[in-house]
Image (cartoon, rainbow, N blue to C red):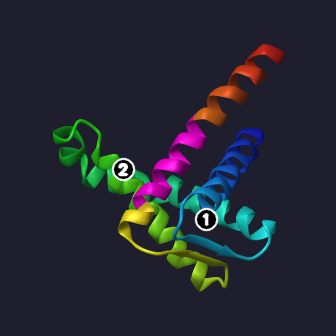
Amino acid sequence: MTKFFFRWAINAVALYVAVLVVPGIDLRGSWTDVLWLALIIGLLNALVRPLLKFLTCPLIILTLGLFTIVINTIMLLLTSRIAQGFGIGLSVDGFWTAVLGSLVISIVSIVMSVIFRDELKGKS
């Protein structure tokens, strides 16, 4: 259960950084909206992303893994659409903005996971 909250917090921070850094990704709302967005993207990554990776496995192999950037972009665009359906004001201007946003989210998530995983290992 703590791993779930840990991933949720990392996704929230990564999404917030993407909103701050990437022009074209806008969030109209409060910090609780960031938490809801992190939950949405976490659920999509758990449920939809494995299916997309399975269906596009030949493309992922052919591009030596670079097609996962396109999958991450699709996840961000899908998160934006679902969030708008729930009344959360996340807007992504277009495909290339989503590519840049997904790269920022991935980098921040990886860095934070490595930093906090090392701290948790040191405490046990």
Can residue 64 be seen here? The reply is: yes
For this view, does 80 lie left or right of residue 15? left
For this view, does 105 lie left or right of residue 94? right
For this view, does 22 lie left or right of residue 120? left
> Along the line of sight, which residue is nearer the eye, 10 or 45?
10
Query: Disc 1 designates what residue?
Result: 40
Near mark 1 (Cα within 10 A), the count class, few <14, some 14-19 or many ≥20, is: many
Near mark 2 (Cα within 10 A), the count class, few <14, some 14-19 or many ≥20, is: some
Q: Quadrant of residue 117?
A: top right
Residue at figure coordinates x 80%, y 72% from the top left? 30
Query: Where is residue 53 shown, x and y percent of the image?
Result: 33, 50
Q: Earlier in the sequence, mark 2 or mark 1?
A: 1
What is the magenta range? 99-110
Three-letter code for the amino acid on which mark 2 is drawn: Ile
Query: Where is residue 2 shown, x and y percent of the image?
Result: 77, 40
* Residue at the outermost right position: 123
Where, quadrant-wise, is the N terminus in this rendering?
A: top right
Query: Disc 2 designates what residue?
Result: 69
Q: Helix, strand, or loop for circle 2?
A: helix
> Along the line of sight, which residue is nearer the eye, 16 or 56?
16
Dominant secondary structure of the magenta stretch? helix
Where, quadrant-wise, is the C terminus in this rendering?
A: top right
Is 123 above or below relative to 16? above
Query: Where is residue 75 shown, x and y percent of the image?
Result: 45, 61
For this view, does 33 lie left or right of residue 11? right
Residue at figure coordinates x 57%, y 60% from the top left? 41
> Along the line of sight, which residue is nearer the eye, 90 or 60?
90
